Image (cartoon, coloured by chain):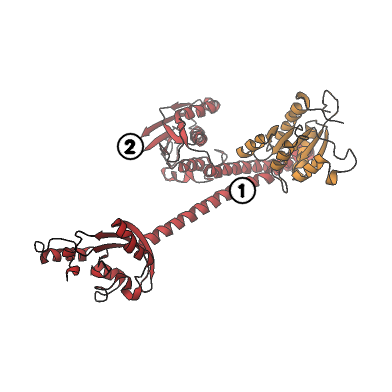
Amino acid sequence: MISNSIVSAAGSSGAATGAPAERLLLDIIDTVREPLVVLDSDFRVTHTNRAFYQTFRVDRADTIGEVLFALGDGQWDIAPLRELLRDRLTVESELYDVEVDHVFPGIGRKIMLLNARLVTHEPSVSRVILLAIEDVTARRLAERRLAAQRLELQRSNAALNEFAFVASHDLQEPLRKILSFGERLGTSAGPVLDGNARQYLERMLSAAARMRALISDLLAYSQVATSSEPFLATDLAAIAREVVADLETSIAEAGGRVEVGELPMIDADALQMRRLFQNLVANALKFRRKDSPPVIRLGASSSNDGNCTITVSDNGIGFKEEHGERIFRMFERLHARAQYDGSGMGLAICRKIVERHGGSIAATSTTGQGATFIVTLPVTQAAAEHVP
Amino acid sequence: MMMQDKHKIPITILICDDDEDDRMLTQQALEDAHISNELRFVEDGEQLLDYLYQRGQFSGETGKAPRPGLILLDLNMPNMDGREALQRIKGDPTLIDIPVVVLTTSGLDADVIRSYQLGVNSFITKPVTFSGLVEAMNVLGRYWLEIVELPPVAA
């Protein structure tokens, strides 16, 4: 039975490689963890292995000598597989990573990745077809589930952003009117209102003004992610100098100074980088100690993993180490408004900006010992556009 | 009263805003800014065009819809919004010479850019406070009604 011997069928010169070599080959085939099938030129199964029997739940007796397409009462009569073995293989003789998705009536859906090879060493000997099958059903289904989840996540993120934008945008309208008519009321009725009534009106207006600040920061926050500004090569040192110039008055009033060290060029949204530095420096100025002038240092270091690290450190009041994560949340505040005013959105916006750039932000501090904000950003962005 | 120097005819200011509160606030801000020109109001882009073409509810006897010397235009309105109205006005040779100032709550870059591309003459984001609005109307009045030379309007 020459056609049933792999070794002779594959064209080796008979006697030298006898039964031991054939035995070894069969053992190798049997030990391989992936299903492997050897077919003769009529597509009859001459050899296969344990993995094949296990994966496709068939018996050796019903398999060997049968035509592949007739296996399991025709369960293997798969059109793409026929086309692959009959037509493509005779042309190409080696095929790799061909995916076949098939629902077997008995064992259900199987997604198979196939390698096939047509072996014709000598024209006189029958051809042999080797078919290696990897069952990638679980992997492919998991990948598809993951892709679907990623899509759903993107959709819900977009919806959330849209909501934040619309809500904050539309809430501004009635608020502007409350402020405007309140102001008119104060002007026209102010003289006739008694002390209490005037105070109520003032409190109402100051609460409305605060709400306006909150909504406007929420709007700014929602716009970070929806920004369509491209990432361009951006000189962070120039941006830091601009920010320091913008804050000059506040820095002078606090009697402090900002030291800008060497900062790199990175691919970024320049406007958002400006906002990031602005928020971090303004934050450091705001939370200064009463007894010593603020000194704020901006520095950077780059690592060999394609990221750069920018630090903004101050000698201010700092915060308790355990609040290191909390301070980046939306509307989060560690102090009473009477002490330090603000919406609590500044650092949340910083984090959102850094995340949009694929980076991260963290802060370390000990109460009374100043704080250090550490921003890690990729130096290059895949989607960056470089001006020649 | 702000006049056009050459012809000494006080211009009509046409205010297009869908929101009644906003029409009231703009009117009062103009008053507080001592701008006593005749004010006319329309509530969306369609009404604005009807007014300018003197058709529909604005057809008939003269004086019902005097040609404005300045249009204050809101952007976000039902039916026809300010963007489309602006496009129509600046696309019509008979209307193109009427100065249009967008006065809106939107400060979106996209709206500012689009409006100028469509040929708006100025773009003002509505100040949040009433005193801010009065100040804006003050400056607007000084600029459009005193400093600049406007195209002559037939009486």
Residue B133 found in image quarter: top right
Q: Is residue A376 above or below residue A241?
A: below
The location of residue B9, given as percent across then percent down, is: 86, 28
Q: Is residue B136 left or right of residue A236?
A: right
Tell me what hue chain A is rendered in: red
The three-letter code of the residue at mark 2 reads Asn
Residue A11 found in image quarter: bottom left
Residue A128 found in image quarter: bottom left
Res A198 seen here: no
Res A188 seen here: yes
Q: Which residue is mark 2?
A: A304
| Front residue of this view, candidates A241 and A64 | A64
Q: Is disc 2 on the same chain as disc 1?
A: yes
N-terminal of the two: label 1 or label 2? Answer: 1
Q: Chain of mark 2?
A: A
Quadrant occupied by the N terminus of chain A: bottom left
Q: Give the spatial CA distance, label 1 vs label 2.
A: 42 Å
Q: Is residue A140 above or below residue A214?
A: below
Tell me what hue chain B is rendered in: orange
The three-letter code of the residue at mark 1 reads Val
Q: Is residue A336 left or right of residue A171?
A: left
The location of residue A333, given as percent across then percent down, is: 52, 43
The location of residue A76, given as percent across then percent down, is: 34, 70
* Residue furthest front as drawn: A124
Q: Which residue is mark 1?
A: A166
Quadrant occupied by the C terminus of chain A: top left
Q: Chain of mark 1?
A: A
Q: Residue at x 49, y 56 (%)?
A: A152
Please, what secondary structure does the residue beneath circle 2 have? Answer: loop
The location of residue B58, given as percent across then percent down, is: 85, 43
Q: Is residue B140 left or right of residue A128?
A: right
Mark 2 Cα-neighbour bin, 10 Å: few <14, some 14–19, many ≥20 = few
